[in-house]
Each structure stands twice: as C-alpha cells, then as structure tokens.
Amino acid sequence: MSACQVIGCLVGIVTGVELLCRMSLVAPMGAHKAGFHPTAVYGAVAAAGAVGAALQLPAASIGSALGIAGSMASGIIEYLAEGTWTKRMHAGWSAQSGVRAALMARAGFLGPRTVLDGAHGFYRAFAPSVSPRFGALTEGLGARWVTEDLAFKPYACGTMTQPFIDCAIALAESGVGPDEIREIVCEVGEGTVHRLWEPLDVKRRPPTGYAAKFSTPYCMAVGFLDRRAGSRSSPTLAFKTGTCWRWPARFAIRSIRQTNTPARSPATCVPCSPMGARASSVSRSCAAGLARL
C-alpha cells in the first residue's frame, strides 16, 4: 500500500467515525426508541461517507453515496428478546452497505441529497419520536472533533453497562463478600432501562450467553466475582461456566435519570447487607475500567 493510499484510508476512517458520532447527536436515543440499532442504521450512512472520502470522490458523488446508503440502512434490536445473534452482523452489514453505496455513486448512480432532513428522510424513518437537531451535524465542524468524546468499552458488553461493572468490582475490592449483600440498588439512566434492565426477572437470569451481555445485573455479577476486564471474563464465558447464577437476583432499580447522553452518566450503586444496613454508595464513570486492561 502506497503512502497516498494509507493517507486516504486514514482520511476515510476519520470522516466516517466523525460522521457517525455527529449523526448520533441529531436525535439522541431516537433510534433505540424506534427499535433500531444505531450502529447498524447510522453506520451504513457513515460508512458511505468514509469510503467516499477515502476514494476522494467529488462532493456531489459523496452526497449521492449518503443518499443511497439511506436506503440500505437496517438493523433492529429484537435480538434482545431471546439473546439471539443478529446484532453481531450489524456493524459488518452497515460497512458493506457503505462500500456498495460509495461504489454505486462513483459509477454515477444518484441518491437523494435530502436523505437526512427530507420529508421522507432518514430521521423521520429511524427516529420519529425525537425532533431532530440538524445543527449537530455541522456545529464546530473542522474545529471540534466529536470523535474525541467516544467512550471505550473495556468489558465485552454494552457501553452503558461498563460503569456498573466498575461499581461491582470496586465493591468487591472493598472487602465485601457476596454473601454479605442482600440487595444492590442501582440508579439507572432512562434510555438504557428497556434494553439492559427490563424485564428485570429475565435480566436476572438471562436465557443465553449472548443475552447475558445485555443484562446489567448479570454483567455486574461477573465483575464482582471475577474482578477482571477482557474476553477471559466476558458474560458469555461466565454464562457457560455457570459461576454467576445466584448473585444477579439481588439487583433492583431505585431511580431513573433522564439523560440524552447515557454513556456519560456515572453509575451509582447502593449495597444493602442481609440485616438491612446500607453501605456507602459506589459511583463510577465509563472511563474507570480502562485502567484494568
């Protein structure tokens, strides 16, 4: 690969990631509320922009590529119901859609320039319950990088579960044993409840190893008992070994915080002893677990 090709690839990556981040800010939580996986639907359009930039397509062709990708975007979150595997293909599906859209645009195929803000556009289809704020796409463009606000995932599960795992690890490291805890009450951001906490009985005992990745109580149990990050202590592996079955039943939700940026919201957990005494609460942010890698 030549130096020019390397630079083009890097330009494409930066363009795609920044576009994906900015698209997610136009209608926060709207895609999830409509039953769509943001990585899948936003990813197709962002990938088209990435490939278009890498190929150095003219602006009009990149516009068409985005428009074409709008008709390729797909990916629902019904995998949550039974812990099935369709989420695993979403990122790859959106990536291949972006490649195809850009190549079609390069060949002269036309896509709608109003794909995002049109009367029948992307956000009306994928986030109809939220009034879109299209200024998020261009505010500070070229001066401020939204990419810098990305949250890393040190654990093999959803982003919004990460700080709760850190709370569980911190609790275990404080010297508290599993049999000393009757209940842990967690403060939870509203946008994550229907995916990671409800129905609570199912989340306490997920039906499959993959479903365990989307159960905050189960993931916290893995963190508390293993105190590690990474694939060797993943919820799926713990599910197979059967080491975490009793503990998740002790979790409850105390309050729901309204937030448009749940990934930035700290997790707060309050443990209670079998005698009913409350220990000090534990709070952690999304970045806390990175030090364990």
Image (cartoon, grey):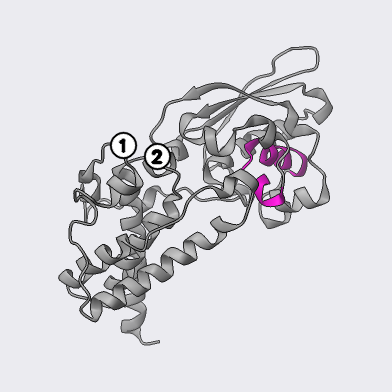
Q: How far is the residue under mark 2 from the one under mark 1?
A: 8 Å
Q: Is residue 221 magenta?
A: yes
Q: Position of residue 215 (x, y in %)?
A: 64, 40
Amino acid type at mark 2: Met
Quarter assignment of residue 100: bottom left
Instruction: Identify the mark nearer the N-term, 2 or 1.
Output: 2
The mark found on residue 62 in the picture is none
Residue closer to the observer: 27 or 275: 27
**Could you say which is closer to the camera, residue 178 or residue 238?**
238
Q: Which residues are magenta?
A: 208-226
Query: Is 74 left, or right, of 153 in this rendering?
Result: left
Q: Position of residue 6 (x, y in %)?
A: 37, 79
- The reply to whether the magenta stretch includes residue 213 is yes
Look at the numbered discs 2 and 1 and tell me whether their residues touch, using CB distance below 8 Å.
yes
Q: Quadrant of the N terminus?
A: bottom left
Mark 2: few/some/many CA within 10 Å (<14, 14-19, 20+) = many
Amino acid marked by disc 1: Val
Residue 110 visible in the current orientation: yes
| 101 or 230: nearer the viewer | 101
Secondary structure under the numbered disc 1 in the rendered image? loop
Name the residue carrying label 1.
130
The residue carrying mark 2 is 29
- Indicate left or right for 88 with 169 as reference: left
| Percent position of residue 248, x then y | 73, 33
From the top left corner, tell me how far across and down residue 181 is, in percent: 77, 23
What residue is drawn where x is 60% and y is 49%? 157
